[in-house]
Image (cartoon, rainbow, N blue to C red):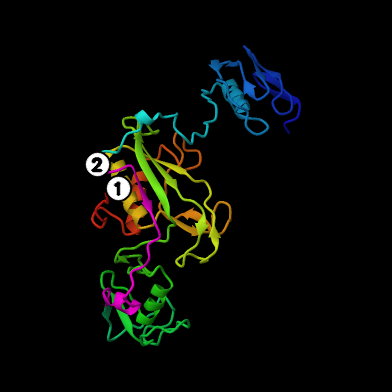
């Protein structure tokens, strides 16, 4: 237990009180003293003198005890204070905020965009499908019925025959056309289709992000792991509102917690590339969605939508900060999964 007591070894003894109260540690050649929560002295062992830097006690015993025992055994000790959470950069004046090279403007807004009218789901899917006259004897992965049998979908009846089978032109996966029409009708109905097996996107995928504003600029501070460049700061602002027909609960209010949200990228060539693709994702309403928060469990609230952002400026205690050598490559892969890459990205809007 960690109540008041003594610790004795071949080389010395120590005394502590509960929860790191005042006490002493003595060895054959020296002694040390700590005050509650902090080690403030030195420990010397038979093998030489070792200094234990100030540390904050963790739990009941803390890192100080570890350092004491290591030093008494003649092992090297290098202890520091636990890192602090640094969410934001030092204050920046307006004159220090600069535009981003190669990126026009410093902000853009999104509004509710209605799906294009005039084309039925069948007409949309016709662009992406090839007819299959002799279906393979395998399951349709949407309804889980055999492709040689009619679709097992039981919802509203599409205007296609339930036994019609089609193959997606680029990836080659095969489904009941009946099932694909039903899947399209249950989605965003934006003229795009995503293969449920391999996630290949046909057309331009858009999301259901509620209206808001995205600001972006350069600040004169460096991120951990990127000492040779400045930092791109992104500020997302989305107000609470009423859900539209494309959202989970049309007509019901939604909350928007934690806005404005500040995010950070290195102002490097690859960092600017990521920013330009994030701008495309923002225009396509793919950065945020309305759903249930995985953090709080709150429903009908604005949540991140599968494109990770770094919200911790000067540390990485939450996993959402720097240094992170793989982050830029990872987020490029996430954007590609949403159909956004250098090849497919639309030209930047002024």
Q: Is residue 293 above or below residue 58?
A: below
**Dots 1, 2 in contact, CB < 8 A:** yes
Where's residue 5, x and y in %? Answer: 75, 25
Residue at left 44%, top 29%?
A: 91
Where's residue 326, x and y in %? Answer: 36, 44
Q: Which residue is mark 2?
A: 102
**Is residue 123 on the magenta stretch?**
yes
- The quarter holding residue 6 reads top right
Asked whether residue 221 appears in the rendered view, the answer is no
Residue at left 55%, top 26%?
A: 81
Q: Which of the two residues, 349 or 315, is positioned nearer the viewer here?
A: 349
Where's residue 248, x and y in %? Answer: 50, 65
Where's residue 181, x and y in %? Answer: 37, 78
Q: Which residues are magenta?
A: 102-129
**What separation in Å lies between label 1 and label 2 (alpha carbons)?**
9 Å
Q: How many marks?
A: 2
Q: Is residue 331 above or below residue 4?
A: below
Q: Which of the two residues, 119 or 180, is positioned nearer the viewer here?
A: 119
Which residue occupies the extreme top position in the image? Answer: 29
Q: Is residue 338 left or right of residue 54?
A: left
Q: Which residue is mark 1?
A: 276
């Amino acid at each position: 237990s960690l109540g008041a007591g003594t610790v004795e070894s071949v080389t010395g003894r120590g005394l502590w009180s509960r929860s790191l109260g005042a006490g002493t540690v003595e060895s054959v050649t020296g002694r040390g003293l700590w005050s509650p929560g902090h080690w403030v002295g030195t420990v010397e062992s038979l093998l030489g003198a070792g200094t234990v830097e100030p540390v904050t006690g963790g739990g009941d015993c803390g890192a100080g005890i570890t350092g004491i025992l290591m030093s008494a055994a003649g092992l090297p000790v290098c202890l520091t204070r636990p890192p602090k959470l640094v969410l934001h950069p030092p204050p920046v004046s307006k004159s220090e905020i600069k535009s981003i090279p190669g990126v026009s403007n410093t902000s853009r807004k999104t509004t509710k965009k209605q799906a294009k009218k005039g084309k039925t789901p069948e007409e949309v899917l016709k662009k992406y499908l090839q007819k299959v006259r002799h279906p393979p004897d395998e399951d349709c992965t949407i309804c889980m019925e055999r492709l040689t049998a009619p679709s097992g979908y039981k919802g509203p009846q599409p205007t296609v025959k339930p036994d019609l089978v089609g193959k997606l032109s680029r990836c080659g996966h095969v489904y009941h056309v009946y099932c694909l029409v039903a899947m399209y009708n249950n989605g965003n109905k934006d003229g795009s289709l995503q293969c449920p097996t391999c996630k290949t996107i046909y057309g331009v995928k858009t999301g259901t992000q509620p209206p808001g504003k995205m600001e972006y600029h350069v600040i004169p501070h460096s991120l951990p792991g990127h000492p040779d460049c400045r930092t791109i700061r992104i500020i997302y602002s989305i107000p609470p509102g009423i859900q539209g027909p494309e959202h989970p609960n049309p007509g019901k209010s939604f909350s928007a917690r934690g806005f404005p949200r500040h995010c950070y990228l290195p102002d490097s060539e690859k960092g600017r590339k990521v920013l330009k693709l994030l701008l495309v994702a923002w225009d396509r309403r793919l950065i945020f969605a309305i759903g249930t928060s995985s953090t709080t469990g709150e429903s009908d609230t604005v949540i991140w939508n599968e494109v990770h952002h770094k919200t911790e400026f000067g540390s990485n205690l939450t996993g959402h900060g720097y240094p992170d050598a793989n982050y830029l490559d990872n987020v490029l892969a996430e954007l590609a999964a949403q159909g956004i890459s250098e090849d497919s990205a639309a030209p930047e809007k002024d």
